[in-house]
């Protein structure tokens, strides 16, 4: 029996990575990078996007676009059938659902069309933070109970599943998000004039409520009162964009807040910025923090989710209790006026992230878990 298991799990695995849609969001970027590294390890990976989208993802292998309309995200029998047909034809060994919509899509496809491939859920947030009613709780518990395994992005996310949903510890592993280790280029030409105006702060996130852009803008207004020529770059898009631009105007800071939309040169921008600001209300473990550490850009963030697992206060970044906007402002101002502090934080953070969060090493940990799941199914 041991020989059979070894033979089964040493073969080249066929892995499906299920993502929401083609877009440069954290979950999609990491799934793409993970897939590339798994291919480099000799595995076969296919990236499957569920919903329609006009973006691109950083994966050069096989991509299947189901192109399902977002309006069908609750009930989509046709889409579930599409996935089932793909699985019946290609016979993948593992399907990883990356983020909530993909978990729901995979689970219902499996329930309705009775395919057997194990589902692994990549949990990137504390799920209980999004539960505000009993029906939501029972629905999410129903989904979780139908996966073979969960790979959480942080220990706090793993613990949340156990305490909030009574999910068995034996079916959870924690594997953090990783980064790509490659040279960082020069300052983007189109931003030179902004950097010449004064010290630049940066924020990178989708424009959704949990990222707390309104709090970010209030904090930035208080920073301006201390350092008048400071600039803020906001990278990302989302449903709140128009509202946030109006709020910046209301605060009288619109001339120093620059909405850049989606960018592919985030590391280059970070390299020349004075700090990454992340006053999120809810987080798992955002990859943007690790990217900032790699780019020698110090981080100031609320201590939520798994952020405290990678940032040690005053050693690899600065942490603030959630909603303390005054202290957040003071710490940002201290970074801007204290070059020695910035240098200390960035050197320690860079060494930490390079030694522990290389995506090549992260991919090996995922592959070991996949093989363990498959061996236990024999």
Image (cartoon, helix red, strand yellow):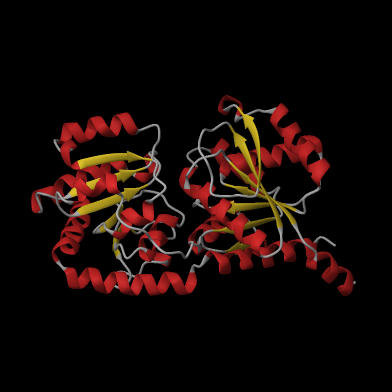
Q: Residue at x 76, y 59 (%)?
A: 13
Left-right relation of 285 to 281: right
- The residue nearer to you, when weighing 58 against 355, is 58
Snapshot quadrant of residue 113: top right
- Residue 170 is left or right of residue 339, and the answer is right
Quadrant the C terminus occupies: bottom right
- Relative to 331, residue 84 above or below: above
Residue 337, horizontal then vertical, whole percent = 13, 64
Q: Nearer the viewer, residue 23 or 121?
A: 23
Residue 121 or 236: which is nearer the viewer? 236
Rendering coords of residue 27 (x, y %):
52, 49
**Res 129 visible:** yes
Q: Work out whether residue 15 or residue 173 is closer to the camera in this orientation and state it.
A: 15
Q: Which residue is at 37% across, 67% downward?
A: 311
Total numbered labels placed on residues in the image: 0
Q: Residue at position x 88%, y 73% from top? A: 3
In which quadrant will I find the N terminus?
Answer: bottom right
Q: Is residue 132 left or right of residue 48?
A: left
Residue 31: x percent and y percent?
57, 52
In percent of width and height, residue 70 lies at: 56, 28
Whether residue 323 can be seen here:
no
Q: Quadrant of residue 106?
A: top right
């Amino acid at each position: 029996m041991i020989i059979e298991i070894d033979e089964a799990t040493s073969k080249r695995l066929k892995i499906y990575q299920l993502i929401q849609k083609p877009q440069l969001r954290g979950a999609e970027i990491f799934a793409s990078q993970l897939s590339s590294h798994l291919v480099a390890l000799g595995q076969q990976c296919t990236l499957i996007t569920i919903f329609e989208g006009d973006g691109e993802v950083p994966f050069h292998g096989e991509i299947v676009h189901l192109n399902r309309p977002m309006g069908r995200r609750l009930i989509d029998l046709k889409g579930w059938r599409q996935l089932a047909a793909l699985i019946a034809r290609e016979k993948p060994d593992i399907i990883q659902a990356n983020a909530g919509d993909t978990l729901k899509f995979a689970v219902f496809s499996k329930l309705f069309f009775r395919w057997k491939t194990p589902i692994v859920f990549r949990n990137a947030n504390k799920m209980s933070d999004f539960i505000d009613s009993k029906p939501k709780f029972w629905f999410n518990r129903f989904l979780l109970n139908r996966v073979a395994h969960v790979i959480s992005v942080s220990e706090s996310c793993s613990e949340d599943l156990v305490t909030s949903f009574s999910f068995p510890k034996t079916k959870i592993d924690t594997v953090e998000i990783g980064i790509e280790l490659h040279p960082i280029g020069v300052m983007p030409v189109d931003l030179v004039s902004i950097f010449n105006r004064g010290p630049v702060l940066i924020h990178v996130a989708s424009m959704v409520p949990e990222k707390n852009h309104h709090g970010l803008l209030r904090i930035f207004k208080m920073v301006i009162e201390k350092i008048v020529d400071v600039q803020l770059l906001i990278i990302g898009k989302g449903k709140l964009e128009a509202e946030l631009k109006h709020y910046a105007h209301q605060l009288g800071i619109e001339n120093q807040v620059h909405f850049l939309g989606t960018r592919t040169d985030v590391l280059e921008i970070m390299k020349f910025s004075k700090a990454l600001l992340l006053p999120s209300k809810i987080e798992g473990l955002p990859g943007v923090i690790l990217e900032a550490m790699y780019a020698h850009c110090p981080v100031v963030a609320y201590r939520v989710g798994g952020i405290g697992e990678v940032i040690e206060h005053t050693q690899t970044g600065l942490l603030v209790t959630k909603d303390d906007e005054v202290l957040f402002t003071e710490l940002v101002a201290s970074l801007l006026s204290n070059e020695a502090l910035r240098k200390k934080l960035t050197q320690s953070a860079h060494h930490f992230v390079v030694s522990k969060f290389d995506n090549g090493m992260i991919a090996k940990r995922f592959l070991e878990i996949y093989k363990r799941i498959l061996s236990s199914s024999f």
